[in-house]
Amino acid sequence: MANSDCILVVDDDSSLREMLAEYLGSHGFNVALAADGESMRVELERACPDLVLLDLRLPREDGLSLARFLREHYDVGIIMVTGSGEVVDRIVGLEVGADDYVTKPFDARELLARIKSVLRRMYSRPDGAVATTGPEHVRIGPCTLDMQGHRLVGPTGAEVPITSMEFDLLKVFVENPGKALSRDRLLTLTKNRGWDPYDRSIDIRVARLRRKLEAGADESSVIRTIRGVGYMFAPQSD
């Protein structure tokens, strides 16, 4: 990744902002800082970052509202910063489009690894049209998953927005066609062991993917619910 990658840190804790500015700056990132939603918008007008590190608990306008605003208006990576006990809020954050989350208190090295992972996935999405044939392109209902480009392409050729975690989940499904996968197995295969297999993270993601993939079709036609087990990708023959 380029040395000019810009990270916007949005957190009302000034000491944490300064620590992250110093740490991320020492690893080659340009770092901008904001204490709340208002100052975040000022920074966005000044220069659009590559990734936003967004605290969940902010004064006046919370991180969930800001994540929704970012996803609707900017093509940026989003990592939510949450408290360790805020399971429901983490799930909602992922539902509104965050690419990942990290819980406080966090290890700076883990945060750096998560930032690099999200940026790698973003940079792997080439501009322009996507071919829809060959082993790197897998049909999923009316859509096509571009395995190399980390993109989901709709039936008209337009890209369907998905987060990096949604891509990971789709990739696991298409690599295991016809196999019933438990929630715990999905967590392992997507390398998201930070989730709790008994919370609603997987269920929410599957529901979102079904809406994006099937556009009103029967929800069981592509990703089927296997009662008492989990989910299964059922490829459709042409």
Image (cartoon, grey):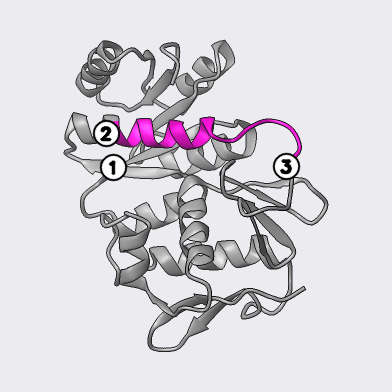
Disc with the residue nearer the chain's start (1 vs 3)? 1
* Kind of residue sitting beneath label 2: Leu
Tag 1, which secondary structure?
Answer: strand
Q: Do residues under tags 2 and 3 come within 8 Å of each other at their CB atoms?
A: no
Q: Do residues under tags 1 and 3 come within 8 Å of each other at their CB atoms?
A: no
* Kind of residue sitting beneath label 3: Val
Extreme bottom residue here? 227
Q: For residue 140, what is the image quadrant?
A: bottom right
Disc 1 target residue: 102
Residue 154 spot, x, y in % from top left: 74, 54
Q: Do residues under tags 1 and 2 come within 8 Å of each other at their CB atoms?
A: yes
Looking at the image, residue 115 lies above or below residue 198:
above
Q: CA distance from mark 1 to mark 2?
A: 7 Å
Residue 54 visible in the current orientation: no
Looking at the image, residue 130 lies above or below residue 217:
above
Span shown in magenta: 113-129
